Image (cartoon, grey):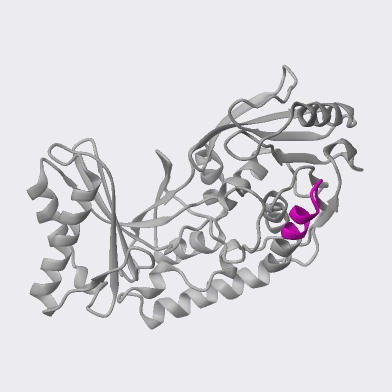
Amino acid sequence: MPQSAAVRFFVTAPQGTEAVLLEELRELGLSRIKPRGLGAEFSGRFADAFRVCLHSRIAGRVLWTLAEFPLRGEQDLYDAVREITWEEHLDEARTLSVRAAGSAPGLTHTNFVGQRTKDAIVDRLRDRIGARPSVSRDDPDVGVFVRLSRGRGTVSLDLSGQSLHRRGFRGATGAAPLKENVAAAVVRLSGWDRKTPFVDPMCGAGTLCIEADHWARRVAPGLARERFGFQRWLSHDARLEREFARLVERAKAAAVAEGPEVVGSDHQPLVIAAAQEHAQAAGARVQFRLADVSALASTVPAGTVCSNTPYGERIHAPDSLWQRLADALAAISPGHHVAMLLGPGSKLRVPPYATSHALLNGTIECRLARWTT
């Protein structure tokens, strides 16, 4: 890895969360940040990218841009990939995976793009070190990403390893849990100030509550992970590992023990038990209660009510549930922020003055309806 010069990184994020990702990256002190489709690009040192891996709640992956080149066909791809100094990052003892996205002239199938990229990497390594790495689709030591767009190709290394939404502590869950980075974005978009109470009256696996608690108490989401992808590269030397270890210690020191009241409720005992197990594994300070949505009450001071509501692809909801939820929301006192994540065909009545923000939960198109009572 370069020792001091600034290099380019790309941070991926779920569709619809790009604006809050930019906000988060600025809070982390990064500079030269540029919004890009499904994420953001920044220039910096590896310590900056390490901090994103540790602290970003919204990022999916952090990618180091190794090369970008014009692309007229298959040979351009092969030649450009083979020019990259793969022997700095890989040897025969390490495993490799290649993922591809996009298209270019003569390169319309991502499987073929991935195969030709792998061929170029392997051929380079055979020439330089006389050996080749093995391929691992599930848990590679080195993850390579190839992106083809507008007649150009980009090749990157994945610092993350597993997607950053995998915090490392999820245990038992309710049906179709919300991804943690989408949940973190929803909490940010809800208008919560991290001081007043946060309430989820349909908490399911408890993901929104756990993300809210950790954000308020400055618990870095990467602290629970066993390791990141960059720690398995040949180029990740002892000096960089010491630098990363210092960042980990600072992150631990920054967390605080107490935070605002965070409460989740659900009407199913087994769901509440799973949420409690999940929160305990995460070290989150969340109160879970067995209660129907109709029991939703105002908080003092007025806080934020935020929930991932049922939708057809996730959980069937009877009409009576929508009515009870609408009545409960209408009854809370003025001054509360309300944010409801609604899926296709949602039957929840929202005020005409509510704003709507589109985002994806996995592959499901949703909207976050927001208003103040």
Image quadrant where one finds the C terminus: top right
Residue visible at 22% across and 73% down?
Answer: 133
Q: Nearer the viewer, residue 310 or 128?
A: 310
x, y (%) of residue 156? 30, 56
Rendering quarter of residue 297:
top right
Q: Nearer the viewer, residue 2 or 248?
A: 248
Rendering quarter of residue 45:
bottom left
x, y (%) of residue 120? 13, 61
x, y (%) of residue 360? 52, 37
Image quadrant where one finds the N terminus: bottom left
Residue visible at 85% across and 27% down?
Answer: 327
Residue visible at 16% across and 57% down?
Answer: 81
Image position of 295 (left or right of 166): right
Rendering quarter of residue 23:
top right
Against 339, residue 279 (above or below) is below
* Residue 271 in view (yes/no): yes
* Residue 68 in view (yes/no): no
Image position of 326 (left or right of 121): right
Image position of 149 (left or right of 185): left
**Residue span colored magenta:** 263-275
Determine if the magenta segment contains residue 264.
Answer: yes
